[in-house]
Image: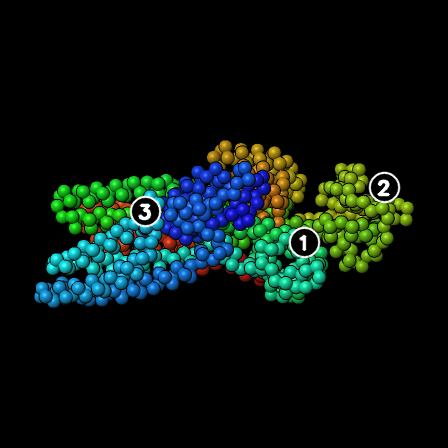
Amino acid sequence: MALASRDLGGGLRQVVLSVPDMRCGGCMIRLETTLARAPQVRSVRANLTTKRLAITWQTENNSQPDFAALIGTIGYTAVLPTEGHDQPDGEMSELLRALAVAGFCSMNIMLLSVSVWWGADPSIRQALHMISAALALPAVVFSGAIFYRSAWRALAHGRVNMDVPISIGVLLSFFLSAYDTFAEGRQAYFEAGTSLLFVLLIGRTLDKMMRKRARSAAASLADMMPKGAHAIGPDGRINYIELSDIAPGTHLLIAAGDRIPADGTILAGISELDRSLVTGESRWETIAPGGLVRAGDLNVGHPLTVEATAAPENSTLAELHRMLEAVEDGRSEYRMLIDRAARLYAPVVHGLSLLAFFGWFLATHDIHHSLTISITVLIISCPCALGLAVPMVQVVAARRLFKHGVVARDGSALERLAVVDTVVFDKTGTLTRYDPMLVAATSTGPMGLSLAASLARYSSHPLSKAIVSHAARGKAETLPLEDVREIPGNGLEACFRGNRYRLGRAAWATDSHLIAASTVVLTQGREVLASFVFGERVGAGSANAVRFLREQGIAVQMLTGDVADAALAVAREVGIDEVTAAALPKDKAWAIDALRSRGRKVMMVGDGINDAAALKRAHVSMAPASGSDIGRSVADFILLNADMNGLEVALTTARRAAMLIRQNFALAIVYNVVSIPLALSGYASPLIAAVAMSTSSILVVANALRLDRKDSLPSRRLARKNKLAGAVQ
């Protein structure tokens, strides 16, 4: 267990276990409650869709927990996902075989029953009942075994799951019919038990198929990653190693067509990388020795030698995978409501079933009829639809967002995003790109440009790179400089032919505040030899995002620490009217608090360290992946692409998800309000109960899948925008 756990720091570790026996909301509650009582456990989250448990634990007195054994005490089996026990193929094959047997038996029994219904002679009727019993036996034994095993494990550990009433219903129906047959009764209900199995198996098979279609983005992402890599040993030999054996410092050979398994640095080779899996960018990026690579990048050019700088479990892609799992496991207000309902399921439903049995027995003195109604109540009231109402929508929403370059960190963030009425943007790195745009360059002579370019080559700052690029186009001379120093936050200085030159902020290089902050100057003493005026490049999709928000009736503001002139220029270009400039980090946080105090539901979109406090104070927050680590760590949504188009997709998806969740709740509530009284009053049979229960679950899952329709409105609108942008370019 310790080896399979991921170190979270501070003594905390996390392990993910697969629990194939998890069937309903009641199972989730039982598993979470049992594990939460363990002294080492700090938190536990069950995911019904993926049938997994995420357990955060801390060692006490160097004791090693055995969560699998603890889970086994309440009748569930827990295995590590890497062991392959949570793969759906084996279970699906068993379901299909059981379905085939139940279908064959029930259909033939139904045909035989027609003769009985039309008034067959007693001797023929008895023979038909005996043949029906022989046909029903394999269905009850073989097809029903799926339900019996689950029910027995639950009962053996003092609990009840949804398969207990199903098993009781099938077995009682068969044995009562067998008794009626040998007692030469007029009626036998073998078709009821076999048809009940057939319908339930159809529902369970369709449910599994639809869940597979709605498979989580986290699972799909994990499947795309390599299971190992070719490592280069100290002696130069190349061996294939498992993913778990890759450690910082491991040298890896990445062939053309292979995905990179861990973050690292290029040691040898020049190639192109497809980084669309993580960033969403379709353009290939050329990489050379010294360049950084991330797990998930696809090598589409030539072989590369990479030195791993992090274990795969600590890579950028692993962090992304954990974010996706977090949204699928997250507890929103809706899911907490479902959890409370699941706790009431067992006492309320079983109490109603017993009440129905005793009530009908006192009224009719017919134990056969009373048992039938009691079983019908148990089957029809199973809260499967209610348990699937929220998690299915959240899983589909997370997958849809990821396909469009947006990662949600928490399921509740989707609910909060759906009610946003105000969006506050930071400017630099959010509405504008990090790469600056050189607007104008002036020099007192060719020597000024050559000196500036020669100094700029010693820095990797975006402004320095822009100066070098401009000088290269002018074929400026590279000069030999001496005593080059970089002054953080100010610029560069160096000596050339006995004179000292400075390149950087005007206020620092000239000791004067009269030159605009957006201007970089080259000086000797206080004399300006060259000046470079920079402007900001507005990010792709920024104007479209602002326009979309205004069309939706959402107020838009800009809150930036930059000077007013630069802020207003960008605001005019993207269409923002309300601007607050020169704001310190605390000012941004106060501004968000002020909006919230007026009852506004604020979304903050920012990227820098100075935005962290505001991102945390906002009702919901979003940060680009290119921003600071602190900004990403506190944001609810991460934009993988380098534009703001993901904001429209995120907001539209969140609103549609909220609508579908409300619809699913309505479906589940209407189903229970209608079906339970019908069962209690005797107007439903076990067969009708099975059809109703399966249909309600399938309807909820199918409704959730509507969120991922290919012809959705946001996709069409973005396609039109991209087409128009391409035409303009």
Q: Helix, strand or loop at disc 3?
A: helix
In depth, the one of 525 and 32 nearer the eye is 32
Residue at (59%, 53%) from the top-left corner? 312
User: Observer-nearest residue: 20 or 70?
Assistant: 70
Q: Earlier in the sequence, mark 2 or mark 3?
A: 3
Amino acid type at image mark 3: Leu
Q: Residue 534: x and y, percent? A: 71, 48
Q: Which mark is residue 212?
A: none
At a point 31% along the width and 54% down the height, the residue shown is 148
Q: Earlier in the sequence, mark 3 or mark 1?
A: 3
Residue type beneath disc 2: Gly
- Note whether 134 is above or below 560 in the view shown: below
Q: Is residue 641 left or right of residue 354?
A: right
Contact? badges 2 and 1 (CB < 8 Å): no
Task: Confirm whether residue 388 shows in the render.
Answer: no
Image depth: mark 2 or mark 1 in front: 1
Front-most of residues 539 and 126: 126
Q: Which mark is residue 249?
A: 1
Horizontal side of residue 482 vs 648, given as left or right: right
Q: Residue at x 89, y 45 (%)?
A: 499
How far from the left and from the top, in percent, is residue 440?
Answer: 74, 51
Seen in the picture, residue 215 relative to 584 is either above or below; the reply is below
Residue lying farthest to the right in this orientation:
498
Q: CA distance from mark 3 to mark 1?
A: 52 Å
Which element carries disc 1, helix, strand or loop? Answer: loop
Q: Earlier in the sequence, mark 2 or mark 1?
A: 1
Q: Which residue is mark 2?
A: 525
> Rounded to the nearest whole Å, what is the CA distance between mark 2 and mark 3?
88 Å
Q: Which residue is mark 3?
A: 155
